[in-house]
Amino acid sequence: MANITRFDPFNEMDDLFKGLFVRPMRFDLEMPVEMKLKMDVTKADDSYTVKAEMPGIKKEDIQVSIDGNQVTISGEVKKESEEKKGEEIIRSERYYGKVSRSFTLPHEVDEAKAVAKYTDGVLNLKLPMKVKAATKKLAVV
């Protein structure tokens, strides 16, 4: 008895063109990869601590915004590279990109007491929780 197999014409065409458009290339420059903001969020008794890895971003290009319990961290990368041989430019490359991340915390953040520090490519945020107002009972007259 014969085995029945399904014919896929695109699979056969793939073998036909395999290696046809491939050229050996070599890049000595590290190609920029899409940046992703990696971070750790920890909770203490009265505050949150956020550590966000932001390598290659200058301190003045980082923005942090707090709206209640929502926090947004964003930064902009600007890299330029130029290689010259004498007066002739051999290669010139530019990379610009923006990275952003928003997250919601279980408690509201006290914006007035929040602190942000940036050292060695790591943004450290200390986000104290907003103290809840005590419930006030009114006497009915």
Image (spheres, grey):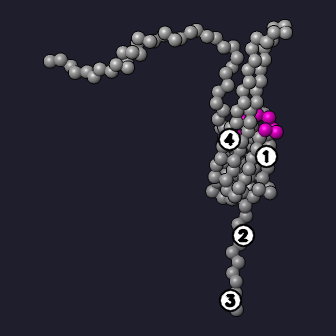
**Residue 140 in which image quadrant:** bottom right
Magenta-tinted stretch: 52-61
Viewer-side residue, 22 vs 2: 22
Residue 116 image label: 1
Q: Which residue is mark 4?
A: 100
| Residue 42, position as x, y percentages in the image | 66, 48
Q: Residue at x 48, y 10 (%)?
A: 19
**Residue 141 in which image quadrant:** bottom right
Residue type at tag 2: Ala
Asked whether, in this view, residue 132 is left or right of residue 18, the answer is: right
Q: Which residue is mark 2?
A: 133
Viewer-side residue, 46 vs 139: 139
Between tags 3 and 2, which lies in front? 3
| Residue 105, position as x, y percentages in the image | 64, 54
Choose the circle earlier in sequence order: 4 or 1: 4
Q: Secondary structure at mark 3?
A: loop
Q: Secondary structure at mark 2?
A: loop
Alpha carbon separation for disc pair 3 and 2: 21 Å
Depicted 39 relative to depicted 10: above or below = below
Residue projecting furthest to the bottom: 141
Label 4 close to label 3 by CB (< 8 Å): no
Alpha carbon separation for disc pair 3 and 1: 46 Å
Q: Which residue is mark 3?
A: 140
| Residue 137, position as x, y percentages in the image | 69, 81
Q: Residue at x 66, y 14 (%)?
A: 27
Residue 60 is covered by the magenta coloring: yes
Choose the circle earlier in sequence order: 3 or 2: 2
